[in-house]
Amino acid sequence: MAGPHTSTALENESEIRDLVWRALDGVADAKSLRRLETLVMTQQSARRAFCDVACLESHLRQVR
């Protein structure tokens, strides 16, 4: 099973860093800020889903 650090996730994290630096430098436009928000929410959802699956697998192993 792929974790939250697939190549797409790593690409997203790289883009998030770039967008954050642009925002901090004061050069991010509204479209960039919306993209940043979307990427962050996607990353958080992916991590939560991965953790939920990992917790479920662990619980199922204990129940057996």
Image (cartoon, rainbow, N blue to C red):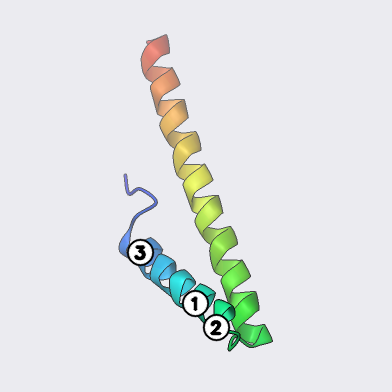
Mark 2 against mark 3, which lies toward the viewer?
A: 2
In the shown orientation, is residue 43 left or right of residue 35? left
The answer to which of marks 3 and 1 sits earlier in the sequence is: 3
- Relative to 52, residue 58 above or below: above
Front residue (pair 9, 59): 9
Indicate the amino acid at tag 3.
Leu
Q: How many residues crowd mark 3 within 10 Å: few (<14), some (14–19), many (20+)? A: few
Residue 50, located in which quarter of the rendered image? top left
* Residue plotted at (43% across, 68% down): 12
Q: CA distance from mark 3 to mark 1?
A: 17 Å
In percent of width and height, residue 38 lies at: 60, 68
Indicate the amino acid at tag 2.
Asp
Q: How many residues crowd mark 1 within 10 Å: few (<14), some (14–19), many (20+)? A: few
In percent of width and height, residue 24 lies at: 56, 77
Return the residue at label 2: 25
Total of numbered circles in the picture?
Answer: 3
- Mark 2, secondary structure of its residue: loop
Q: CA distance from mark 2 to mark 3?
A: 23 Å
Return the residue at label 3: 10
Q: CA distance from mark 1 to mark 2?
A: 6 Å
The quadrant of the rendering that contains the N terminus is top left
Q: Which mark is residue 21?
A: 1
* Residue plotted at (44% across, 19% down): 59
- Mark 1, secondary structure of its residue: helix
* Residue plotted at (37% across, 66% down): 8
Indicate the amino acid at tag 1.
Trp
